[in-house]
Image: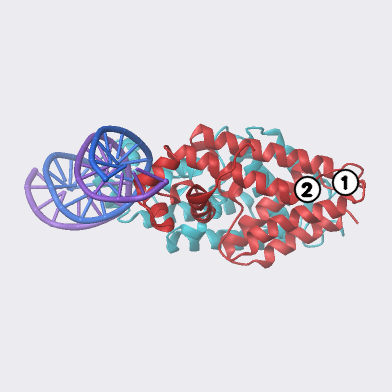
Chain colours: A red, B cyan, C blue, D purple
DNA sequence: GTCTATAATTTGATAGAC
DNA sequence: GTCTATCAAATTATAGAC
């Protein structure tokens, strides 16, 4: 297992992810996290010595969760439309919960000033996601979106929905994207 | 004039915008700004008493600049394709400069934890932008993207480009978006 | 408008006891 | 693993002199 956390460490990651997905990297402090999970801030440092260790762990765990939810991109029993539908579903559950956005959307936007270990993890996430979508779209009809187009559309849709407070905007973007595949 | 700043105030806004467009709202401190423009941090507070005043002013000035660059959405001498091209051009100049992303993309992503005056300004920006694009696309062919789709695609494309360090990804998203209009 | 001085709080991080 | 205690630095913000 590449990165499996349990017990308090996992609780800390949960709390950190929640806060980061609302306000970005700087919205997380050791003190807040400590209070969230019922220990002292020094104990949080025991699990994650540096903040960048924490940030990287949050991202990597998130990536694994998303990739697991996506499943294989080349299941012969599925059409490209079905695969892209699953992708948008993953993002919908991230965006539709009032007050939550995709972790890598927030962190990706501010990745220029993130500690290198964290921004590198974000970069790997997007490359992996683009790879999955590219495979998922193999054999798609002519008018189909590119992998970059599909990912960008969904990421941007989340920002729109969050920033305007209008969740319908996510649907308004997601739906036409899927329609081009049918 | 709704919001015109000159002299040191404008310099402060320049410096703040640059920093925010790299790392978000928390990447800006009064001290750094003071050093950027060659005064002391207390003097920055003279121009912008609270940080939220500064944040809001940065956003509102940015919005005016973008809307001016976009021009009228209903110039009869233009086709929808030409208008959307101008929109994407505005974003390209924001994304292509190495290490700069659209201000409202970064702030929009973290708007859930922004001071209300700032997040409200961000919300107004997107509503205004969506309005512009909706008008710009009036009379567009059947396969054309919706306003939300166009804006989301460009916002997401910037995140992809920044987070992966691969600027081509912006082009790979922008190009097919425009092609649907020809 | 800009300065010095300073306050109050928060933050990431460490040392060492239990 | 968790605690107490503590640190140095940074942050937003204010008071008052020039």
The image quadrant that residue C15 belongs to is top left
Q: Secondary structure at mark 2?
A: loop
Q: In the image, C16: left or right of A59?
A: left
| Residue A6 vertical placement versus A35 (above, below) | above
| Residue at left offset 68%, top offset 64% | A169
Image x and y of residue B78, in percent:
76, 52
- Give the chain of mark 2: A
Query: Badges 1 and 2: C-beta atoms under 8 Å apart?
Result: yes
| Residue at left offset 45%, top offset 42% | A47
- For label 1, count other residues whose C-alpha is less than 10 Å away and answer few (under 14), some (14-19) or many (20+): few
User: Which residue lies under the disc numbered 2?
Assistant: A71
Q: In the image, B10: left or right of A70?
A: left
| Residue at left offset 80%, top offset 56% | A85
**Front residue (pair B91, C14):** C14
| Residue B153 vertical placement versus B40 (above, below) | below
**Front residue (pair A164, B57):** A164
- Residue at mark 1 shares a chain with residue at mark 2: yes
Image x and y of residue A157, in percent:
67, 56
**Front residue (pair B111, A132):** A132
Q: In the image, B28: left or right of B104?
A: left
Quadrant including the N terminus of chain B? bottom left
Q: Secondary structure at mark 1?
A: loop
**Front residue (pair B9, B113):** B113
- Give the chain of mark 1: A
> Can the viewer see residue B2?
no
Image x and y of residue B154, in percent:
68, 48
- For label 2, count other residues whose C-alpha is less than 10 Å away and answer few (under 14), some (14-19) or many (20+): few
User: Which residue lies under the disc numbered 1?
Assistant: A75
Image x and y of residue B107, in percent:
52, 52
> Can the viewer see residue A51?
yes
């Amino acid at each position: 297992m590449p990165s499996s956390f349990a017990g308090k460490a996992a609780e800390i990651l949960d709390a950190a992810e929640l806060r980061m997905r609302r306000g970005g990297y700087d919205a997380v402090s050791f003190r807040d996290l400590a209070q969230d999970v019922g220990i002292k801030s020094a104990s949080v440092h025991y699990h994650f010595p540096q903040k960048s260790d924490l940030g990287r762990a949050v991202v990597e765990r998130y990536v694994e969760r998303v990739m697991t939810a996506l499943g294989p991109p080349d299941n012969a029993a599925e059409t490209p439309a079905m695969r892209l539908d699953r992708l948008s579903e993953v993002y919908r559950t991230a965006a539709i919960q009032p007050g939550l956005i995709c972790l890598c959307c927030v962190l990706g936007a501010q990745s220029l000033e993130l500690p290198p270990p964290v921004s590198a993890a974000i970069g790997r996430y997007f490359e992996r996601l683009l790879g999955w979508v590219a495979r998922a779209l193999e054999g798609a009809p002519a008018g189909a979106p590119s992998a970059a187009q599909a990912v960008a559309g969904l990421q941007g849709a989340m920002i729109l929905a969050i920033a305007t407070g209008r969740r319908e905007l996510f649907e308004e973007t997601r739906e036409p994207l899927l329609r081009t595949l049918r």
